DNA sequence: AGCGATCTTGACGGATCCTTAACGCGCAGC
DNA sequence: GCTGCGCGTTAAGGATCCGTCAAGATCGCT
């Protein structure tokens, strides 16, 4: 049975979705703000996520980022009509689809089916361990085995997250810039050089001789596991 | 570069999309009815498909079915506002997203990025193994079974990629030059000689007596599996 | 308003890579 | 044997890319 998590602060919408989804034999759980929503995602591991952007406690794109850091669960965003740039921001943050309120229930259900259908069956392992340090994507924490926890800035963390999620694979500069800074920064390869250096300084046992954060000249970077 | 195929019968939309997509460095091809659209999908193998449902010759859902029969290329559907059941039908037929006209270009571009981002990795055989080395196209890595990984420059990698994708087949010099260096370099067969030699030096057990990267005099090269 | 942390931006030396030209070799035609 | 052509090989320059540093600019918090 497909499990759906709905994150919305309006009781009426929550109720309507619960009724309709349950009737189609989905398994529904709910949360009414961003923080408890993120906790619920980590706890329940739903197959698909319906997220209202108008949450009281945090910005919607931050919720998306929080999920996308370690999970590829499909995310369908709900929001009021007309916020074009908000729409773009949500999709670029990693949302899979965007439905404007008021919405037709049939359309939402169809988009739900489409999202579940194409969902990647890859259940990512949210924690990675090397001889020198450990990265936990779900909790957003990295600690070196020798000394204790390592403090990363938000940008550093995002960059590391993308590389670790694609561990072993070569990640293009374009892709890194796009996922961390946004599609408008595709050519600012300067940023990459600066932040890769900072990550190496904080993680590598020998920053000048990188063992994990490898650079492939002219192409991009690779996290070697 | 991401290749987009637009199937639409309205010249104005075709033109607007072509301009905007080209400006974002997408590679755009177009078709103006369903039949030629399906042919174009089979021929061009686009990375993503933008499909108008109001085509003159056939029903939109039939086009979707025609594509989904053999390809999982993401499909973004365009249509006029208000046809709720059509929307549901298109999504259930296998479309990935649905945008109503008139649409904001920024939104469409964002949905395009989202569709490409979550696209399933190519169903091609992404890894090729020979007695002497292994080429993994998905991860962009090649390693010799005797010694460890081999470092390839961007150009070397591109060239090898084209040859491996067409393994067993003869690839024309023209085609190689065009795919690696661009259409303006079709006559610079010098480059090929230089880079084929470099690949042989890095991959062949006996670079002077090639076993995998074969020369077809006067024609081109062939990767022998 | 002030302060610290973080992000952006520019500049530089050094490493890497691409381009280009030259030369040798084998082969076919004259 | 001579010549022209295509291919393999090599090496040198010039362009590009990368790592590094540090000085503003910006942000968040008190």
Image (cartoon, coloured by chain):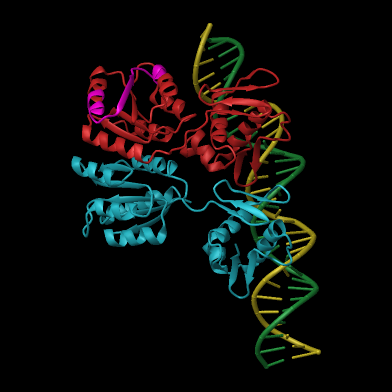
Chain colours: A red, B cyan, C green, D yellow
Count how many numbered circles sit on residues in the image: 0
Residue at x 60%, y 43% (from the top left corner)? A220
**Placement of C2 over or under A163, stated as above or below:** above
Residue A28 in the magenta stretch? The answer is: yes
In this image, C7 relative to B2: left or right? right
Confirm whether residue B14 shows in the render.
yes
In this image, B149 relative to A186: left or right? right
Q: Residue furthest front?
A: A1
Residue B201 in the magenta stretch? The answer is: no
Q: Position of residue B171 (x, y in %)?
A: 55, 67
Confirm whether residue A51 shows in the render.
no
Image quadrant where residue A32 sits = top left
Of residues A16 and B102, the one drawn nearer to the viewer in this rendering: A16
| Magenta extent | A18-37
Of residues B125 and B175, the one drawn nearer to the viewer in this rendering: B125
Residue at x 42%, y 51% (from the top left corner)? B47
Quadrant of the image containing the C terminus of chain B: bottom right
In this image, A106 relative to B49: left or right? left
Q: Position of residue B93 (x, y in %)?
A: 27, 47
**Placement of B13 over or under B206, stated as above or below:** above
Q: Position of residue A200 (x, y in %)?
A: 67, 30
Of residues A137 and B224, the one drawn nearer to the viewer in this rendering: B224
Q: Position of residue A138 (x, y in %)?
A: 50, 24
């Amino acid at each position: 049975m497909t499990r759906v998590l709905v994150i919305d602060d309006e009781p009426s919408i929550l109720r309507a979705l619960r009724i309709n989804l349950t009737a189609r034999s989905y398994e529904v759980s709910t949360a009414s703000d961003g923080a408890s929503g993120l906790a619920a995602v980590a706890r329940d591991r739903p197959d698909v996520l319906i997220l209202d952007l108008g949450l009281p406690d945090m910005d919607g794109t931050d919720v998306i980022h929080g999920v996308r850091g370690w999970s590829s669960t499909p995310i369908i965003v709900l929001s009021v009509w007309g916020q074009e740039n908000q729409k773009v921001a949500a999709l670029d943050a990693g949302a899979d689809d965007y439905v404007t309120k008021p919405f037709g229930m049939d359309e939402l259900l169809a988009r739900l089916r489409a999202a579940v259908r194409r969902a990647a069956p890859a259940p990512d392992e949210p924690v990675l361990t090397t001889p020198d340090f450990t990265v936990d994507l779900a909790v957003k924490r990295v600690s070196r085995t020798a000394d204790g926890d390592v403090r990363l800035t938000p940008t550093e963390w995002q960059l590391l997250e993308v590389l670790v999620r694609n561990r072993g694979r070569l990640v293009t500069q374009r892709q890194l810039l796009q996922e961390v800074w946004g599609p408008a920064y595709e050519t600012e390869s300067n940023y990459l050089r600066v932040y890769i250096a900072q990550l190496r300084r904080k993680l590598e046992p020998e920053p000048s001789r990188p063992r994990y954060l490898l650079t492939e000249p002219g192409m991009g970077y690779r996290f070697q596991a």
